[in-house]
Amino acid sequence: MSEKAALSPNRIYDVLMIAPTMFFADYGSHVRILEEAVALRDMGHHITILAYPNGRDIAGLDVRRCWGVPFNYRVIVGSSRHKIYLDVMLGLKALSTVLGHRPAVIHAHLHEGALIGHVLSKLRGVPLVFDFQGSMTSEMIDHHFLRRESVLYRPLRRLEWLIDRFPAAVITSSHHAANILINEFECSPQKVYPVPDCVNVNTFRPDVLGTEEKQALQARWNIPPDRSLVVYLGLLAEYQGTGLLLQAAQRVVSARPDTHFLIMGFPNVEEYRGLAQRLGLNEHMTFTGQLPYEDAPRYLALGDVAVAPKVSATEGCGKLLNYMAMGLPTVAFPTPVSREYLDDLGVYAREISPAALADALLALLNDPREAAERGTKLRERAVKKYSWERGSQLIQEVYDNVCSHG
């Protein structure tokens, strides 16, 4: 911790969070926003969150929503043209909020939030902290919303380059993301602060599920109790590796028919359920659809092995922290973020392919003792390095720095 932060460890801030999402929606960036806000509130900070309409209220947080439109009530996942008018409405809501009450810090999530936050920061003379969770243009490409050869790519990349320079400080969800900002977008290292995704290790813990409740959940979802269970929690999409996972599952089940897969997440559930049926996985795979985030620990506790087949090279992968805190041995592709979180305790597919992913899963399934040892050590690593108590202290330091220089 810096000397300035050490001088005022208990300083309390009035924080305006700008979250250009339909917060809360049980996935990805929403989880980071939620856990940050709760951890900071528990430290004594006053947190107000501005968000799109249609999300659900959670954890007693002060969430204030912009106006919606009558023709769009669905939850938006990833890039979408609907976000254009929603961002305009969120910007107007944010403007009216800061004109009525001046916060001490504006904490903006995602690039749209940072752009809105920049205007408010200049208007009210309030320091802006940008919560960077991945490259904007890279995410658009991952979601097939943009192509590199498109005429829009260079202007949007330039806009991203500019937005990354607006804040007084940028906090990143991984050290890899910090390197992207510094090396690709030429941000000053002095204002980039890695605050890796963290996990509530008291909520996500191996002993969260009793025997009777475990049996009840298995019966509810028709999960045979005598099978080894591989669990996945997250969005269902190609950039998340969902198609690769299902193809790998076919190979795993062929080698070990006593294996079952529990796939928890959304959207595109029917699309992937159809693919599972074509691959002959009906008796070996259960899709739950969207689960409330509050239920995630109980469902993960059913698992013997966890898998994170995400192939995006720039985005975070917060599900890994949930797996780790649950003491689940984990298989992943060898992306920089996966290696950062799991270190040498993860089991990595040798390449991004169904065959390599299947081989990595079988390595754990065939050696339960080794799997259990890895799971125990991953839990210890999560508690030591990735608890939100530690993460919130790092954010406190960033607030102290930007406010003392303001």
Image (spheres, helix red, strand yellow):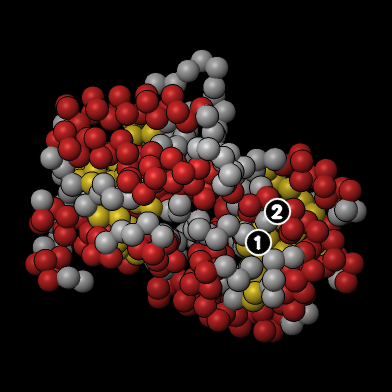
Disc 2 marks a residue whose amino acid type is Thr
Give the answer, above or below, for where 359 lies relative to 125: below
Q: Position of residue 157 (x, y in %)?
A: 44, 46
Q: Which residue is mark 2?
A: 242
Tally of numbered discs:
2
Q: Which residue is mark 1?
A: 309
CA distance for labels 2 and 1: 7 Å
Disc 1 is placed on an element classified as loop
Q: Position of residue 332 (x, y in %)?
A: 63, 68
Instruction: Name which residue lies at 12% across and 71% down.
Output: 3
Give the answer, above or below, for where 161 lies relative to 155: below
Q: Give the quarter of the image for residue 103.
A: top left
In the visual, does 366 lie left or right of 168?
A: right
Look at the numbered discs 2 and 1 and tell me whether their residues touch, using CB distance below 8 Å.
yes
Is residue 330 visible in the rendered image? The answer is: no
Instruction: Name which residue lies at 77% across and 64% down.
Output: 354
Give the answer, above or below, for where 16 lies relative to 251: above
Which quadrant is home to the N terminus? bottom left
Q: Position of residue 402 (x, y in %)?
A: 17, 55
Instruction: Name which residue lies at 35% across and 40% down.
Output: 113
Disc 2 is placed on an element classified as helix
